[in-house]
Image (cartoon, rainbow, N blue to C red):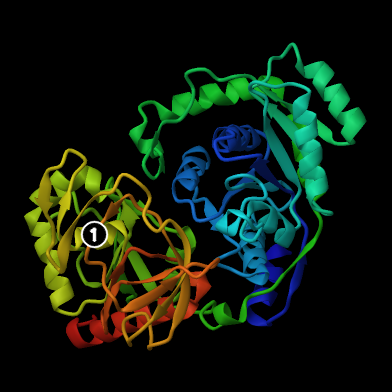
Amino acid sequence: MDKERMKCLVQDSQAVSVRFPRIMIAAEKSGGGKTLFTCALLSLLKEKIQEVRAFKCGPDYIDPMFHRTVLEIPSRNLDSFFADGDTLRYLLGREVLEMEKFPESRIAVLEGVMGFYDGLGGVSERSSAWEVADLTDTPVILLVDMMGRSLSALASIKGFLDYKEKSHVTGVVFNRLSPMLYPRLKERAERELGIRVFGYVPELKDMTLESRHLGLVMPEEIPGIRERLDLIKEKVRVGINLDGIIEEAGRAAEIEVKLPEAVRQFCNVDCGTGIKKTVVAVAKDEAFCFYYEDNLDILRKLGAEIQYFSPIHDRNLPVETCAVYLGGGYPELHAKALSENISMWNAIRQAVMEEVPCIAECGGYLYLKDSIVDPDGVEWPMAGVLPGSSRDTGKLGRFGYITVTSKKEGLLGPAGIEFRAHEFHHWDSEENGTDFAAKKPVGTRGWDCGYTTESFYAGFPHLYFYSNVKIAENFIKCAETWKKKNLVVK
C-alpha cells in the first residue's frame, strides 16, 4: 500500500495522507540530556519495533552520528530554517512511506535542538524544535532536568505547556531524579497538570558523553561506545514506561505529504542498467565527517555515484572521479596527517586546476588553504589551492544560520542565486573570499565570504541542498559536462 502511495507522490503529483507513530524528545535547555536519552530510547525501541527511524532537529551533524551508531542506518535532519513546512513533511513522511517491509511496525523519533522554544536570534521560536513539532504535528515528550529541584519543576512544565496555545507537549520524563521521589512527583504532575509522566532517568554518573569545541566527541572516537550506550540503555529501561511512549507516539495525527515542486523534476532520475553514473568523490574519514544525509541523497537522485575516500589514508582520488565534495569536520585535529599525505593534496590540487567541479565546506575549505595551525600552535602546509592560513580563535566564529547570495556566476549558479546555510567553526582565517554575501536572518549583520569559479565553490558556509535544489543540480550538471569532455565512457 505504501509503495503505491509513494508512487502517487512522485509520479502523479498527488499529496498523500500519512499516519504513523512518531514522537519528539525535547528539553528545557541545551545540555538537558536529549542525546543520551534519545539513543537509549532508540535502542529500546529496536527491541520491540521492526522499523525505527531517527531525525535531528536543526543543523547538527554529530547527534545523528550517535543515532546511526544505535540504529546502524542513517539519521536525518529536519530543519525549519533550511526547509519550509511542505519540504519538512515530505522528508519525514518519505522515510515512513519507504518502510515497506514492516508497515504495521514502525516509529519515528525526533530529537529536538537547544531548548524547546529556542530559535533564531535567541528571541524567536522560528526554526526551533517547537516549530518542527508544529509543522509536522508531532507529539512531544519534554525531558525535564531535576538536578537541584523537585516540585519547582512542575511550575517549569506548566510554563512550557501554557507558553503556546498548541505546545504539542503531551508527556514528560524526569531526568536525573531519585527513584525515591518519582512516585509522588509523578502523581502530582499528572493530577495538577493533566499531563502523562512516562518515567524517570536516574543520575548517570560517569556515563556522560565528552564534548569538544564543535559539540560532542564523535562516537567512533569513544572507546567501547556501543557497550557504554548499552549500559545507559539498561539504566534508562528501569525507570521509563516504554509501552506508554509507544502508545503516545501512535496517537500522532495524520499529516499530508506532497513532493515539493523543486524536487519533483529529479525524483524519477534513473540512469538505467549499463549506464555509468557520474562519480562524486566525497571525503570521509576522521577529519571530514560533517554531511547531511539528504544532501548525498539528492546527488544520487541527480545521477551521481558517491564514492568515499580519505584525505588522510588514501593516496589518490577514486578512479573516474568527475567531482569532489570536501565536507566539514576536524582537519585542525588531524593537520599533521593531512599535511604529510602530499600525494593526496597534490591530487586534489591538480583536480581543481583541471576544473574538476569541487565543493569545499568549512573544514574542507580550510584543507584547501595554504596551511592550518593545529591546537598546539604548529603550522602545517595544506593543499595550497587558496591563500592564507587558519588558526583557533577560541570561540565560535559567525555562528549560526545565514542566507547566502552569490555576487558572481559560478559553480552553484548565476549571480544572484540564493541559498540558506550555516557557519559553525572555531578556526578562522583573514582571507575568506568575497564572491558571496552572507546575511543573518535576524538583525542587519552580514559579511562577504567564499570563493567561486565556473567549477569551484569553497567557503565556511555549510550548504543544505533542499534550501535551493538548483545548487545541487548545477554541481552535478557541471560534473557531467566535465565527464563528457575528459573521460571515455565505456
Type of residue at label 1? Ser
The answer to whether any part of residue 433 appears in the image is: yes
Q: Residue 390, how many percent across, how many down?
A: 21, 55
- Image-based side of 5 in relation to 306, left or right: right
Task: Residue at 79%, 49% (x, y): give it.
Answer: 163
The answer to whether any part of residue 170 appears in the image is: no
Residue highlighted by disc 1: 429
- Image-based side of 434 in relation to 266, left or right: left
Quadrant position of the N terminus in the picture: bottom right
Image quadrant of residue 42? top right
Q: Residue 395, relative to residue 305: is it above or below?
A: above
Q: Residue 149, relative to residue 22: is it above or below?
A: above
Image quadrant of residue 255? bottom right
- Image-based side of 323 in relation to 298, left or right: left
Q: Residue 238, relative to residue 311: is it above or below?
A: above
**For the image shown, how many numbered marks are present on the structure?**
1
Element type at marker 1? loop
Q: Residue 31, how many percent across, how many down?
A: 54, 36
Q: Residue 241, how many percent across, how many down?
A: 75, 28
Q: Residue 319, how many percent across, how many down?
A: 19, 67
Q: Residue 326, relative to residue 15: is it above or below?
A: above
Q: Name the outermost residue toward the top.
A: 180
Task: Residue at 61%, 59% (x, y): give it.
Answer: 127
Quadrant position of the C terminus in the picture: bottom left
Q: Residues within 10 Å of mark 1 (few under 14, many from 20)?
A: some
